[in-house]
Amino acid sequence: DTGIPGIYELTYTDSDAAGNAAAPVVRTVTVVDTTAPTITITAPADGANIQIDSVLNADFACTDNSTATLTCDATVDGAPIADGDPLPTDTLGNSTFTVTATDSGGLVAAGKVTRVLIDVERFMSKCCRT
């Protein structure tokens, strides 16, 4: 199966019309994964303005085209976070959420989003209330 990375041994046998068998020939075939994993980041959305101290859980997934082992790691500003864990929303400003996927063939994919934590009440009091 060319879709499953690994090392395979193929044995070829043949005989002529009289039934005389040829010596078997063995060949080794290596199937290599050349497709990097894929990453889907559902939350936080890239460029999202998020209310300070709100509740927002990380929502991401990593997939690979083979049955190879896949690691899927995420960080918020360098600190590890698991899928489904609450994102930190207690500090104003920009924050970077990064997901990295690595398959057993060493192929790597990375996804990154930037989110902005804002204080809606403070913003509204300065810009929009009369």
Image (cartoon, grey):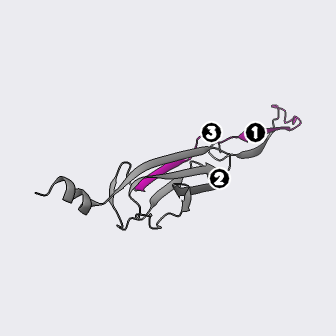
What residue is at 76 percent from the left and 45 percent from the top? 7
Front-most of residues 19 and 55 = 55
Q: Which kind of residue does numbered mark 3 sit on?
A: Thr
Q: Which kind of residue does numbered mark 1 sit on?
A: Val
Q: Is residue 78 above or below residue 82?
A: above
User: Residue 68 at what x, y percent from top left?
Assistant: 65, 52
Give the foreground label among 1 and 3.
3
In the rendered structure, does residue 17 fall within the stretch colored magenta? yes
Q: Residues within 10 Å of mark 2 (few under 14, many from 20)?
A: some
User: Residue 101 at what x, y percent from top left?
Assistant: 58, 51
- Sequence-wise, the earlier of marks 2 and 1 is 1
What residue is at 68 percent from the left and 46 percent from the top? 105
Front-most of residues 53 and 72 = 53
In the structure shown, which secondary structural element does the residue marked by tag 3 occupy? loop
User: Residue 98 at what x, y percent from top left?
Assistant: 51, 51
- Sequence-wise, the earlier of marks 1 and 3 is 1
Which residue is the site of mark 3?
Answer: 34
Cα separation, mark 2 vs mark 3, equals 12 Å
Q: Which kind of residue does numbered mark 2 sit on?
A: Ala
Cα separation, mark 1 vs mark 3, equals 15 Å
**Residue furthest left in the image:** 130
In the structure shown, which secondary structural element does the residue marked by tag 1 occupy? strand
- Sequence-wise, the earlier of marks 2 and 3 is 3
Q: In screen coordinates, is 91 left or right of 49?
A: right
Which region of the structure is painted magenta? 15-43
User: Residue 39 at what x, y percent from top left?
Assistant: 50, 50
Q: Residues within 10 Å of mark 1 (few under 14, many from 20)?
A: few
Which residue is the site of mark 1?
Answer: 29
Q: Residues within 10 Å of mark 3 (few under 14, many from 20)?
A: few
Which residue is the site of mark 2?
Answer: 68
Which quadrant would residue 88 be assigned to in this image? Answer: bottom left
